[in-house]
């Protein structure tokens, strides 16, 4: 059995850890509320812009096609966190990224990654994966318009010059604080609207366009890619805070249980020590009496 001094030291260490995890849980909860509000406010814009892009694509699909003689390369943006302590959040995203890369390779495309977040950058460096760039140190805010515009400019530039034939983003779709789903969204080339479940074609909206669809298409494509990437960043930010809050809550509860077990062990050790001392006293008294 461990000594009383060692048990007290362990209890003090666990209590210090508990204070840290409780503080991190409260910080993540506050950040999660702000991230949820931003996500809910941006979703209608993203959904409406996607419908507009789909409708314009139906009238001019050749404007969204890859460049002639484009390289058979698929660029995969992977949105992870810069910090750990968020459970299986990053591991699930990296697993989805690798599965997406395998599907791209099976389709005859060479997968290349763009790491958003230190955890994805460290992973791809360890696995020696093909890396086309990175953006790290995105704390305290991951979802910023500036980052979305920079990423969109790279994706569209590579797509137009023929450096890539396809681009997509891996991120974690936010459902709740305890549920996040790794997701892959294809950004370019924009796909035509899918038919309904009964096989009927989805109704297309007839827009009156001035001066022309050809001049409007690049603007819509840039806005669509920027909004899609910004939406992925918002989803990722909310998912990260939700995962970290849940992980820190579990860690805090585990610390409470461990402190209770250690306290019980300390009491038993103290009782055993008292019993031994009493036995020594009784034994000494009996020896003097004899």
Image (spheres, rainbow, N blue to C red):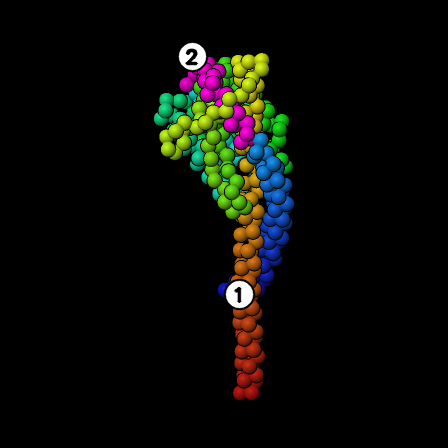
Residue 75 shows in the view: no
Above or below residue 289? Residue 175 is above
Residue 84 or 79: which is nearer the viewer? 79
Q: Residue furthest top?
A: 68
Residue 263 or 64: which is nearer the viewer? 64
Residue 65, horizontal then vertical, whole percent: 45, 17
Q: Residue shown at 57%/53% (left/top)?
A: 252
Q: Which residue is mark 1?
A: 265
Q: CA distance from mark 1 to mark 2?
A: 72 Å
Above or below residue 92? Residue 251 is below
Q: Which residue is mark 2?
A: 69
Crowding around mark 2 (Cα neighbors within 10 Å: few <14, some 14 to 19, many 20+) is few
Q: Quadrant of residue 129?
A: top left
Secondary structure that dominates the magenta span: helix
**Residue 143 colored magenta?**
no
Residue 13, horizontal then vertical, whole percent: 59, 55
Residue 235 shows in the view: yes
Q: Residue shown at 52%/27% (left/top)?
A: 50
Q: Are discs 1 and 2 less than 8 Å apart at CB?
A: no
Residue 225, horizontal then vertical, whole percent: 54, 25
Label 1: state its secondary structure.
helix
Q: Which residues are magenta?
A: 46-72
């Amino acid at each position: 059995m461990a000594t009383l001094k060692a048990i007290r030291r362990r209890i003090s260490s666990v209590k210090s850890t508990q204070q840290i995890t409780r503080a991190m849980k409260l910080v993540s909860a506050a950040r999660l509320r702000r991230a949820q509000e931003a996500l809910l406010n941006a979703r209608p814009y993203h959904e409406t812009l996607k419908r507009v892009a789909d409708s314009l694509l139906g009238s001019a699909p050749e404007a969204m096609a890859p460049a002639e003689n484009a390289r058979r390369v698929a660029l995969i943006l992977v949105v992870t966190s810069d910090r750990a302590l968020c459970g299986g959040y990053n591991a699930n995203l990296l697993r989805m990224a690798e599965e997406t890369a395998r599907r791209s390779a099976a389709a005859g495309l060479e997968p290349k990654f763009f790491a958003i977040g230190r955890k994805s950058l460290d992973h791809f460096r360890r696995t020696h994966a093909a890396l086309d760039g990175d953006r790290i140190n995105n704390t305290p805010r991951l979802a910023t318009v500036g980052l979305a515009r920079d990423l969109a400019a790279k994706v569209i530039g590579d797509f137009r010059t023929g450096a890539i034939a396809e681009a997509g983003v891996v991120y974690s779709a936010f459902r709740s604080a305890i549920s996040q789903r790794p997701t892959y969204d294809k950004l370019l080339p924009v796909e035509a609207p899918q038919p309904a479940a009964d096989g009927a074609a989805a109704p297309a909206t007839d827009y009156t366009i001035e001066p022309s669809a050809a001049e409007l298409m690049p603007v819509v494509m840039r806005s669509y890619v920027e909004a899609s990437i910004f939406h992925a960043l918002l989803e990722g930010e909310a998912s990260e805070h939700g995962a970290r809050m849940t992980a820190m809550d579990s860690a805090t509860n585990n610390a409470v249980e461990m402190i209770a077990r250690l306290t019980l062990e300390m009491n038993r050790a103290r009782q055993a020590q008292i019993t031994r001392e009493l036995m020594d006293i009784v034994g000494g008294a009996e020896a003097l009496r004899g």
